[in-house]
Image (cartoon, rainbow, N blue to C red):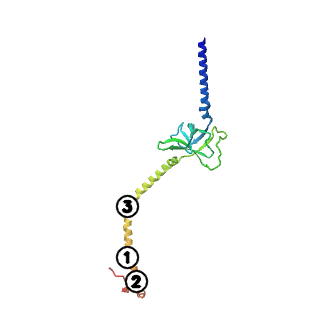
Amino acid sequence: METEKYYFRVGVFFLAVTFIFVYYLMAFGGGQDRKHLVQYAIYFDSSVAGLARGAPVKLKGLDVGVVSDIHFISRESDKIIVITKISDTAPIREDTVATVAFQGITGTTYLSLENAKPQGPAVFLEAKEGEEYPVIRSAKSDLQEIMAVAPKVISELEKTTEQMQKLLSDKNVSGVQDVITETSEVLNAAKAALQEIKMLARTIREDPSVLMRGPQYEGYKVKKK
């Protein structure tokens, strides 16, 4: 009988210790994290490639939370909703903007937050009527902007290359050479005419009466070399 009471006391003691341990974890461990985390929603129209559950959320480079869920908002729409859990001490404001970013050469994807107007009044973000969570605005990252215009830039380069190839074709090159030859002949003729004009001007300067004698005057003519 005494043995049964002994084991009963040990069992009660063990259950009490287990209960206290679990309560401690709930109060000061995971429960505290849940108490100090606020959920926010972010909607993306563009790709969020690489972003997954558990990805870090950073505000101005500091870890402030994690991505808790990510999925399409519905079967009929390709818009993506990202649910985040962010520390309630982080200054999430109405001007806060979220972008998908990549860290270093490892290419680790994370959610980057920036306050667009850090010097402005701090109006903290709250859920609007009809919203389950406060909604942080999204924007394309610099890399996404570059990738978006890349096809257009490549297309323009291809057009420029084709035009250069046409310009430098054998037919056009031959035509340019003909133009250069004709231009050279015209310049040589102009040089000879200018020489005659100079000789005429010198003759008139030396003997203005040549204008009265007319072109039959031999002193007027430039001697042929």
Q: Nearer the viewer, residue 138 or 27?
A: 27
Q: Nearer the viewer, mark 3 or mark 2?
A: 2
Mark 1 residue crowding within 10 angstroms, few (<14) / some (14–19) / many (20+):
few
Residue at image position (40%, 86%) is 206
Question: Label 3: which residue?
Answer: 173
Callout 2: helix, strand or loop?
helix
* Of pointers 3 and 2, the one earlier in the residue sequence: 3
Q: Is residue 220 left or right of residue 40?
A: left
Vertical order, 8 against 221 (above or below): above
Residue 48 visible in the picture: no
The amino acid at mark 2 is Arg
Front position in the image: 201 or 99: 99
Q: Quadrant of the C terminus?
A: bottom left
Residue type at mark 1 is: Ala
Instruction: Kindly report the distance in space between the C-alpha atoms of the residues bearing marks 3 and 2.
Output: 43 Å
Q: Of helix, strand and loop, which one carries label 3?
A: helix
Left or right side of 39 for 223 = left
Sequence-wise, the earlier of marks 2 and 1 is: 1
Task: Tell me if 26 is positioned left or right of 168 in this view.
Answer: right
Rounded to the nearest whole Å, what is the CA distance between mark 2 and mark 1?
Answer: 16 Å
Residue under label 2, please give it: 202
Can you tell which quarter of the image residue 164 is in?
bottom left
Image coordinates of residue 148 in percent, x first then y, are 51, 48
**Does the residue at mark 3 contact the one at mark 2 (Cβ under 8 Å)?**
no
> What residue is pinned by disc 1?
192
Coordinates of residue 187 in the picture (x, y in percent): 39, 72
